[in-house]
Structures are given as structure tokens and as C-alpha cells.
Amino acid sequence: MAFELLVIVISYLLGSISFSVLLARLLKGIDIRQYGSGNAGATNTLRVMGKGPAILVLFLDVLKGIAAVWLGTWAGGWGSWVAVVCGLAAIIGHNWPVYFHFRGGKGIATTIGVMATLVFWPALIAGAIAILAIILTRYVSLGSLIFVALTPVCLLFTEHTTPELWGSLVIVVFAFWRHRSNIVKISQGRENKIGSKAKEGNRVV
């Protein structure tokens, strides 16, 4: 039990590494949470710093989710509660990072890593539909919510463990809670679209 708790804590600490914040400090000497949307994630990195840094942040944030699930799998087996909780811990770390005063991102890139590792095919189908939604609407937040909402639905039509199903439902709650302001903005037509630029020094809300 002690080993399982250890890998869960490690997964949280791993998730707490905010690559968006670190890269912005390294490349521009700024706190990215004070620019663009104020979010420490790949989409805001794209808005504030451009494609190259955004792709790197996306890759590293996804990798956090993958690594956390593999840690849990090593400790408890494939599709186990430990594997799922380690994935959730990484997402929690990304959203509320201990290293950065618990002000992080919204966890979608890390969620992609977690879900793609736990339940690859349902995540792939949901991801394809989410990407199509982003292309059509240019709302990354909408595509993100579609991805997390559809993954447990697709999961029902494939082989899965009980922890995987419950874990995917908890992720839905996390994502919708973190995107609650985006949901309001989408309904009002005020949500930032992909490709919009943030003026340095100004925070877009």
C-alpha cells in the first residue's frame, strides 16, 4: 500500500511541473498566467509565444499523463485503480501545481496522455471528433470538452475495467469545472478562437 501511495504522490508532483510557466519564464522572462487567457497551458502558449513553444508544451504535458499512468500500471497492473488514480493525480497536479501556488492550467493535454494510455481506442475516436469540432468552430475549449465527454461514452462500447470507467467520469467533472468560464463565453460568443493573438502586456478575458 505504501508503494502505491508513493507513486500517486510522485504522479501529482510530476503533473505539477508546469511547462508552460517554465518555458515562458525561460524564453520571455514572463509569467504566462498574466498574459493571454491567463491559463498555463498549450493553447495560451500558442496565443502568447507562438507555434514552436506551444507544440513543445503540448508534447510535454501529454507526456506527463502517459508517464503517470505507466507508474500506476507498474505499481498496480493494467487498468487498475492505482493506474487510474495516478493519471488523475497528474491532472490534478497540472491544474493545481504545488510548485506554482496551485495556479495551473485546465489539464486537457495531460488528460489526453492519461486517456490515450488507459483507453486508447475510445480516446482516439473521441479525439478525432473533438479535432473536427475545433476545425469547424476554432474553439479549442469546445473540442476539449467534447473529447472528455465522449471518451466514457465510447468506452462503454469497448472492453474496459471499472476503474477506467469511473476515472473517465471523474475527468469529465474536472474538465467541465475548469472550463466553466469558457462554457459561458461560448454561449455568449465571446470565447477566444484558435489563432487569435494576445497583445503582450494585456490580458485577454
Image: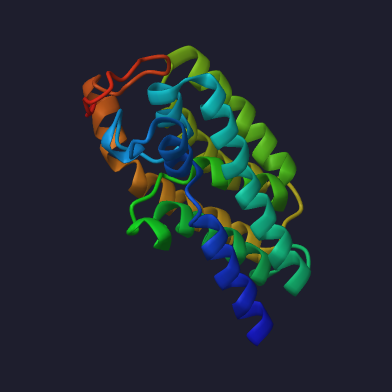
State the image coordinates of residue 88 (x, y, percent, origin top left).
54, 60
What residue is rendered at 34% in x and 49% in y? 177
For the residue pair 97 and 77, the one nearer the viewer reads as 97
Total marks placed: 0
Residue 52 visible in the current orientation: yes
State the image coordinates of residue 121 (x, y, percent, origin top left).
74, 40
Residue 130 visible in the current orientation: no
28 over 66 or under it: above or below: above
What residue is rendered at 30% in x and 34% in y? 182
State the image coordinates of residue 138 (x, y, percent, origin top left).
43, 16
For the residue pair 64 and 34, the one nearer the viewer reads as 34
For the residue pair 70 and 145, the one nearer the viewer reads as 70
For the residue pair 36 and 112, the one nearer the viewer reads as 36
What residue is rendered at 56% in x and 23% in y? 52
Q: State how the image is colored.
A: rainbow
Residue 186 left/right relative to 156 = left
75 over 45 or under it: above or below: below
Residue 94 left/right relative to 115 = left
User: Which residue appears farthest toward the bottom when viewing the image?
Assistant: 1
132 over 56 or under it: above or below: above
Residue 197, by quadrant, is top left
Residue 113 left/right relative to 38 = right
What residue is rendered at 62% in x and 77% in y? 6
State the image coordinates of residue 193 (x, y, percent, origin top left).
37, 18
**In the picture, which quadrant includes the C terminus?**
top left
Residue 9, by quadrant, is bottom right
Residue 156 left/right relative to 51 = right
**In the picture, which quadrant includes the N terminus?**
bottom right
